[in-house]
Amino acid sequence: MAKFNKLPSLSKSPTSWYQEVVVRAQLAEHAPVKGCMVMLPYGNAIWENIKSSLNALIEEHGAENVCFPLLIPYSYLSREKEHVEGFSPEIAVVTHAGGEELSEPLVVRPTSETIIHESMKRWITSYRDLPLRINQWANVMRWEKHPRLFLRTSEFFWQEGHTAHATEEEALAEVSEMTNIYHDYCENYLAVPTLMGRKSEKEKFAGAVESYSIEGLMPDGRALQMGTIHYLGTNFSEMADVCFVNENNEKCYTQMTSWGVSTRLIGAIIMVHGDDKGLKIPPRIAPVQLQFIAVNQDEAVIKCCEQLAADMKKSGLRAKADLRDVRLGVKYNDSELRGIPMCIAIGSKEIESDSVELKLRDGIVRSCKLSELTDKVVYTELNAYHNRLLESANAQLTRMVRKVETADELKQAILDGEMAEMAWCNETDCELQIKEATGASSRNMPLDEIILGDKCTCAWCGKKARKYAFFARAY
Ligand SMILES: [Zn+2]
């Protein structure tokens, strides 16, 4: 009965807890190629739910979905100097195909800016063609030396949005809108709060003018970059010659942006909400939102469970019935391990007394008459559960961000497994020193302009402070 083996403690050994829970809850497993993962039906179902809910928001934002090829000519990647330098250590290259050496090597896409811009060049001629927004759901490859399922894998799944605009102002508005869409999505669907901000020069996307991110904070004190949004300016359009004729008949280069989130979001859900019993999948993206548990094998009980699950499904809930002939404890354990938001046990007693208990995964129990159990009752409880998950994640985030004013305080915060918020000079040399001394990197700089007084100095180096910034060790 391996299933009754307890999971390692999340607080004492978060790494082994994470590895165990991913495998035992059957989210994913390692593929034969190091760094690649096989997403199993349950893990993939979570990803499918994330895709459909986020895709609706991306479409509403005005982007249309496309599919671009996996392979990119190497010469495309090398057009933008910073881009190719940034990605070179991580790219996989195809040199042979069809039994012959290729005249030009092909790169397995690490991201698709260069090949998408090549098409945009043909699609865009006039200002009337702008803005242009496209998105694709795809797999990409960035060779990973220290892989962890969902968090860092060589091949991962994501969406990448690519947009072209007539003016810098419009492109920056796009960046700001997408940053907000990602931030709100994480709260409203994943119950994960994130910090929005601008990346430092060192941490920005290779080839971007500016990069922005939403950063989550995991219970072990490490930050997880959960989404990135890049303002590319005309860096790429000048190289690929993506231009348009404006209202005054002048030729201009288009202003570009790109933005993406990946299967990392699943890593965030696992860590932010999980506990010693297993996962807590947020209800709006949970593959099973409500599980009926047959207490025994009586015909009436089985029938009742089947009927209830079928009725709930009809009203749009993702409901299932666990009718297996195993001990009740096993059924509860499985449901907790897999993080199913709500469980309702049905036995002869419940049927006779017309009363059931709605057990939420966070331990809250509600009573209800069996005859009055409707989808509305379930939705109300699931929404309240979502809010509790978000509230508790918010409290965790607040608890783990420490304001620091000196180098010693910064070192201590990182040692204590926290994130530091501090006034910063925003210089790469200073960031490299901090990384060397503490292992922490700048995560981002908050978007709200906080006015720093003239005398405000960098917590680390003492030079004039230019920005507030979050520093933490990161995945
Ligand atoms: Zn400094």
Image: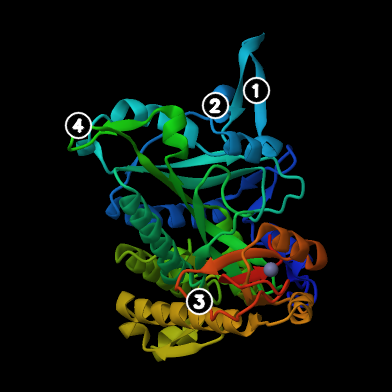
Q: Secondary structure at mark 2?
A: strand
Q: Nearer the viewer, residue 308 or 181?
A: 181
Quick check: marks 2 and 1 in contact, CB under 8 Å? yes
User: Which residue occupies 30% across, 78% down?
Assistant: 376
Q: Position of residue 415 (x, y in %)?
A: 79, 76
Residue corresponding to mark 2: 71
Residue corresponding to mark 1: 94
Residue corresponding to mark 4: 249
Answer yes or no: disc 3 within 8 Å of ligand 1: no
Q: Amino acid at mark 3?
A: Cys
Residue corresponding to mark 3: 343
Q: Nearer the viewer, residue 227 or 454?
A: 454
Measure how far apart labels 2 and 4 are at the Cα level.
Answer: 36 Å
Q: Amino acid at mark 2?
A: Leu
Q: Amino acid at mark 4?
A: Asn
- Looking at the image, is mark 4 or mark 1 nearer the viewer? 4
User: Which residue occupies 48% across, 64% down?
Assistant: 286
Q: Secondary structure at mark 4?
A: loop
Measure how far apart labels 2 and 3 are at the Cα level.
Answer: 46 Å
